[in-house]
Image (cartoon, helix red, strand yellow):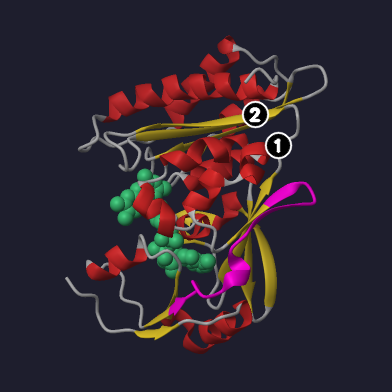
Amino acid sequence: MYPPAFEYAAPESVEEALDRLAEVGDEGRILAGGQSLIPMMKLRLAAPAHLIDINEIAELAYIREVNGHLAIGALTRHADVVRSEVVAGGCATMASAAPWVADPLVRNRGTVCGSVAHCDPEGDWNSVMLAVGAEVVARSKQGERVIPISEFVVDFFTNSLRPGEMVTELRVPRDDDRSGGAYLKLERKIGDYATVGVAAHLRLDEQGRIARAGLALTSVGPINLKVTEAEEMMVGQEPGDELFAEAAQIAARTCEPTSDVRGPAEYKRSVVAAYTRRAFGRALAGARGET
Ligand SMILES: Cc1cc2nc3c(=O)[nH]c(=O)nc-3n(C[C@H](O)[C@H](O)[C@H](O)COP(=O)(O)OP(=O)(O)OC[C@H]3O[C@@H](n4cnc5c(N)ncnc54)[C@H](O)[C@@H]3O)c2cc1C
């Protein structure tokens, strides 16, 4: 099906894009990789009157390390993350997730920030961002806001951007040498969305106890679910399989899977438990420098 008619603009700077966004208000949508927006327009699930294509804004294509965090620009494709040495050395949870996002064609076009903005509960990146405690940088003609990811993901396909704002960057805390992370994804075949995805992150203190724990789940709720109860329970504890099994039970109890073509709800719940335990095991090995 063809999408409804729309006006198209391809600004070459962020300022130009913000001018255009301000002009068109609620009628405008950013077009990044187009891997979610274009199919939605073709299915007529979205019908923006104005598309603001950011693919010509070269200044948004970057991954860099700045003041203890990784800065991921809005034109960073999934494939850039797969290849990035900055990510490989700076965020184990991200590095572990990147090869699991979609298929090579989609990874070459789709962007991390586009995926985060899209807020699809089956998307992999928002679980990673919730687990590591990322922040979203939003800009408008009025200035810049830095939004914690837990406040950015509001609902099913809904973020907390205000009219006239666009995402320009993600800020991901850099792992130190006592941090580790992992993303585990069960999919029916290569390129499929997750049946279940689990993002885990750990930071140890000098005594080897847990200083920070991050846990978030994909495809088992109306949004990507941050399992705060498990995260809080783990802080100050001795890491190990017994503790991870306890976190797994909390995750299984917290998630809200539905039965669908990918499997019955109870099956997904048991995968959540098994993957949570396993993902924390891998995160711990990373945090101890054993990988
Ligand atoms: C066949 C297929 C398989 C896929 N499998 C997976 C998968 O396994 N896991 C997964 O996570 N994803 C998967 N996806 C989705 C894919 O990752 C998309 O790339 C991603 O969801 C959207 O990124 P995009 O850059 O293409 O955004 P677009 O499609 O261009 O935009 C998506 C939405 O985000 C908004 N947006 C984009 N960028 C910005 C910005 N900078 N500021 C504000 N709003 C913005 C747009 O306005 C739109 O509403 C799949 C897609 C396809 C087609």
Q: Dot 1, how many residues are within 10 Å of its Cα: few (below 14), some (14-19), or many (20+)?
A: many
Q: Quadrant of ligand 1?
A: bottom left
Distance between the alpha carbons at the discs numbered 2 and 1 = 7 Å
Q: Secondary structure at mark 1?
A: loop
Q: Is residue 180 visible?
A: yes
* Residue 104: percent from left, percent from top: 37, 48
Q: Are marks 2 and 1 in contact (CB under 8 Å)?
A: yes
Q: Residue at x 63, y 82 (%)?
A: 15
Q: Residue at x 74, y 19 (%)?
A: 209
Marker disc for residue 180:
2
- Name the amino acid, label 1: Asp
Q: Dot 2, how many residues are within 10 Å of its Cα: few (below 14), some (14-19), or many (20+)?
A: many
Quadrant of the frame with the N terminus: bottom left
Q: Earlier in the sequence, mark 2 or mark 1?
A: 1
View extreme (top): residue? 242
Marker disc for residue 175:
1
Q: Secondary structure at mark 2?
A: strand
Q: Residue at x 49, y 42 (%)?
A: 98
Quadrant of the frame with the C terminus: top right
- Quadrant of the rendered image containing residue 89: top right
Query: Magenta stretch?
Result: 52-70
* Residue 216: percent from left, percent from top: 51, 37
Q: How many marks?
A: 2
Q: Is residue 107 above or below residue 61?
A: above
Q: Is residue 4 left or right of residue 243?
A: left
Marker disc for residue 137:
none
- Who is closer to the viewer here, 260 or 281? 281
Q: Residue at x 20, y 75 (%)?
A: 2
Q: Is residue 186 above or below residue 152?
A: above
